[in-house]
Amino acid sequence: MKTRIIIPARLKSKRFPNKLIKNLKGKSIIEHVCLHAKKLNCDSLIVATDNIEIKKLIDNLNIDTYLSKKQCSNGTERIADLCKKRNFNKNDIIINVQGDELNFPVNGINKMIHSLKKSKEEKMTTVIVESGNKNHYFNKDYVKVITDINNNALCFSRLPLPFNSPSNYLIHLGLYGYKVSLLNKYSSFKKSTYENKENLEQLRFLFNNVQIECIKLKKHNSISINSPNDLKLAQKLI
């Protein structure tokens, strides 16, 4: 069993095109994320991209890259394609760090890895945080989540969810963990109308009855870059 950190990096984002190569204090967004990922204890760190410009940036950091020719609708599909092409062991742990998740919580990922190592169940893990920011509550770029008594996800949405309030709710970060055995099934999973409308890849797991364990953190300093305004806010983090 090996632990592999994979960063899916698509250049042509619909909400903020070319955001991964936007400059932030002398480096691109994707470079910042990759250098932060080097702090993680893992067997391999790979950037999975569809763009030669991103590949060249990452090659300069001496980080492994995978240039995908397959048309993928999300990062999980791109990573699943990589795992298949490189014939990774079915028990390998894959941590999907979204390419725009600046300053992501290393402690959260460590907890995800620990959970997957000790679990015999076929499940997915992710990270959530408590929030009371009213601006984020109504912002579709911030994904809200409801969990059950065991901190397993019941629902994800870009819209405000029932039973939440602007002063007390849970936000989902762009971090996913799973074993290769589960990823191998992803392409055969049925897509739901919810996934299409929300544009949230994790909803395909829920729709196909896959448990998503949510690692809850009380605080974090990460920011997902989804708009030019997010890029301005990131200046204070880096």
Image (cartoon, rainbow, N blue to C red):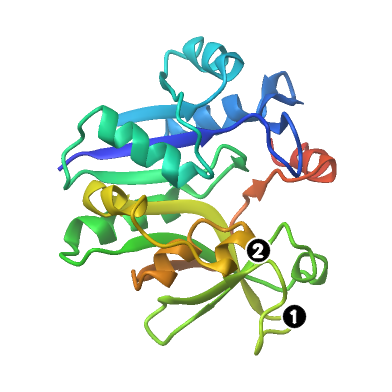
Q: Give residue 137's position: percent from left, percent from top.
A: 75, 71
Residue 225 appears in the rendering? yes
Q: Secondary structure at mark 1?
A: loop
Measuring 56% from the left and 56% from the top, which residue is drawn there?
173
Q: Is residue 186 left or right of residue 98?
A: left
In this view, the residue in front, 69 or 147, is: 69
Position of the N terminus by quadrant = top left
The image quadrant that residue 85 belongs to is top left
Position of the C terminus by quadrant = top right
| Label 1: how many Cα within 10 Å (few below 14, some 14–19, many 20+) | few
Which mark's residue is nearer the viewer, 1 or 2?
A: 2
The image quadrant that residue 2 belongs to is top left
Amino acid type, callout 1? Ser
Using the image, determine if residue 53 lies above or below residue 156: above
Count of picture labels: 2
Q: Secondary structure at mark 2?
A: helix
Label 1 to label 2, Cα distance in Å? 26 Å
Residue 197 is marked as 2
Residue 41 appears in the rendering? no
Please name the residue that numbered disc 1 is placed on.
167
Measuring 40% from the left and 36% from the top, which residue is drawn there?
6
